[in-house]
Amino acid sequence: MADLALPKTLLVPAGLAESLSEPSVTIDDVIQSALNSPAHRERWKYTKADGFLTQLAAPAEAPHINGEQQTGVRWWRETISNPMPGLDLQQGPEAFARLCFVGEAMRLDITGSVTDPVTLIHRSNTLPVIVNLSANASLTLIEMIEGDEGQQTVWIDIGPNAEVNHSRNALNSATSSWQYSSVRLQSSARYHLNNHVLGCGVRRQDLHIIMDGQGAEAKLVSAGMVDNKAALDQQITLEHRQPRGRSEQTIHNIVANGGKCTFNGRIHIHDGASGTDAQLSNKNLGMGDNATINTKPELEIYTDDVSCSHGATVGTLSQEALFYLTSRGIDNAAAEALLSQGFLRQCIDGPLAETALNTMIGVREIGASL
């Protein structure tokens, strides 16, 4: 593989340079090193990065927003000028470059317990969104990815004892789609993501969760359907940096008829993060002809007194269950559809669940083309 490179020279806003503690004159070398580190190149092993890197410098517009007219909510457009806590160039150099190329972001500040959801609708390449929650605040954040192609980056910083319930539907039929989310949790903060996704021409989802405070809790539940030669690449890194954090990840994907799905989930427990409880489960069903599934759960543990598990399965529908249903008068295609729906329903929840159900396993009848 040739070296990964940005489409043009990077000019770094002063605030971001301060976040990285790197002299701006050397930032191109730093970016190039991060893009081509062995760990990062491994994350691009099954998806060509060139198209996404070229689009990093594309113009961006503000996402559409609903629910911003509430007490405790402030939404505005700003030039990026302040340091960003939790910014990790080694983990997400492409997202960092996107911040630099556009030079500005949409800012959402939550200072209290917000009653109604705040909804972001992305219909194209959108400006980065920076979400900050004050201590004890709470937010229901809804994201919907629309349009034929686009890149979206969201940075969430959750203050002490604050909570975010985040639901995202990426169900559009796109040529190219990339979502990057970075979430930092401070002491006793809570984050819950319900992710519903369809494969498309090529879809990439990167998620970096940093448990940066003692007693933080994170839960990720994701359902994916990759059909008809579509592609989905999910890269998830969850870092436990402080003691007594809890995390749980449950990811179910169905891959059918020439679809290609890649999942790489890494749990990194830092030295000193004792009392951590981290669980990861990735289950995949292959259906139809020529389905390709790559899955790689990882654990890095640098401390004692932790409870961790990780696992991945790749299989097909249970023949015993199929026999049971067909023996009771259900035809084979309908039986396959029922079992597939049950598999995905385990990971479809939250305020966008009904739309996800109708799109993934309702209107789009799984099994009809098998």
Image: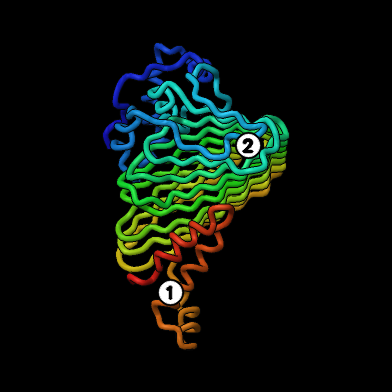
Residue at disc 2, secondary structure: strand
The local crowd at label 1, few if under 14, some if 14 to 19, many if 20 or more residues have their Cα within 10 Å, is many
Q: Are marks 2 and 1 in contact (CB under 8 Å)?
A: no
Residue type at mark 1 is Glu
In this rendering, the answer to whether 306 lies above or below 153 is below
Q: Which residue is mark 1?
A: 336
Q: Determine which quarter of the picture holds residue 285.
A: bottom left
x and y, in percent, of residue 266 in the image: 52, 44
| Residue depicted at x 63% and y 43% | 116
Q: Which residue is mark 2?
A: 211
x and y, in percent, of residue 369 in the image: 33, 70
Residue 338 visible here: yes
* Frontmost residue, 262 versus 337: 337
Find the distance from the CA under tag 2 to the CA under tag 1: 39 Å
| Residue depicted at x 47% and y 27% | 89
Residue 313 visible here: no
Residue type at mark 2 is Met
Residue at disc 1, secondary structure: helix
Instruction: Report the quarter where the C terminus lies.
Output: bottom left
| Residue depicted at x 62% and y 32% | 73
* Frontmost residue, 143 versus 163: 143
Is 92 left, or right, of 184 in this rendering?
Answer: left
Instruction: Report the quarter where the N terminus lies.
Output: top left
x and y, in percent, of residue 135 in the image: 71, 31
Q: How is the image coloured?
A: rainbow
In this rendering, the answer to whether 339 lies above or below 228 is below
Q: Nearer the viewer, mark 2 or mark 1?
A: 1
Q: Earlier in the sequence, mark 2 or mark 1?
A: 2
